[in-house]
Amino acid sequence: MFGYLIFALVLLFLLATILISQGKRSFEKSYLNDVEKSLGRALSQKPEILTEEDLYHLPSPVQKYLRLAGALGKPKVHNFKVRFEGEMRSKGQDWFPFTSEQHNFLDAPERFFFMKAKVKGLSAVGYHAYSNGQASMTVKLLSLIPVVNISGPDMLKAETVTVFNDMCLLAPATLIDERIQWEPIDDLSAKAVFTANNISISATLFFNEKGELINFISDDRYDINQKQWVRFSTPVTEYEDHNGYHLISYGEAVWHYPEGAFVYGKFRVKNIDYNR
């Protein structure tokens, strides 16, 4: 009897493992398909070199940042792929580890972010998609059970902030984009208004004396867990060289609640590729 019970439990475990594996592949495939469609457009984009003339309209600290990043004399950036590892948490919850991969495309613009995580010992996957004037976030526990499924106008505006944040931190060469309106502040900061899909968001960028971007602050991002608009920032504390560029290697994501700042994300950049 016990032999049959053990055999049945083993079969159940194997079946669950197969279902989870298939669910994960199916969910990730939607991300890969979206990326593949957008990569097809990249074939028609002609390479152009970023020159000093492209920087003239930028505030002085932004110009200094692009020079320090090593963007001058290299091809203008049309798309990029980034891999992260780090930790995330919600308010009142413990940290959980994650790895992620994302693709950003500047012509549309588009952002596809796929994350794999372990939450309280259970595997979870998440997919953020920003494309065609829509934004959504889906998270599935064990790759099968939806626990988050969000879209709509608030999500679209919040993800527009995320797209611009990616441009600032991960692809400085894109800051010459004509959809950005710059307002100089001083030698170490500048304000920007980024418009996409008829939505405008603003952010203030802060730099150190060397020219590195050390913080990005915006009031246009929505906290889905608290269901409210909250000041959002991404302080950067470490830089390193990535394939000939001087870029962020470690940064954090912070919500600024009335009761104080709350770090909800720790991101370490593993790799950045431009113009795939």
Image: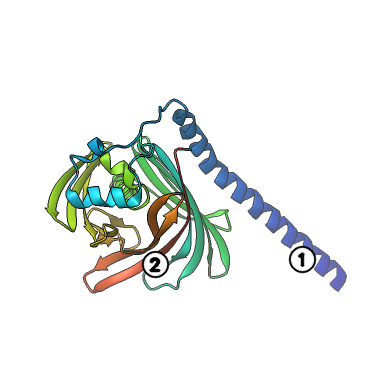
* Vertical placement of residue 255 versus 31, above or below: below
Closer to the camera, 224 or 192?
192
Regarding residue 30, the answer to whether it shows in the image is yes
How many tags in the picture?
Answer: 2
Q: Amino acid at mark 1?
A: Leu
Q: SS of the residue at dot 1?
A: helix
Q: Pick the residue in front: 163 or 248.
A: 248
The quadrant in which residue 260 appears is bottom left
Q: Which residue is mark 1?
A: 9
User: Badge 2 local density, few (<14 within 10 Å), some, or many (20+)?
Assistant: some
Q: Residue at the spot x=50%, y=66% of the render?
A: 97
Earlier-in-chain disc, 2 versus 1: 1
x, y percent for residue 150? 39, 50
Residue 18 x/y as whole percent: 70, 53
Tell me the CA gap for discs 2 and 1.
Answer: 34 Å
Which residue is labeled 2 in the image? Answer: 90
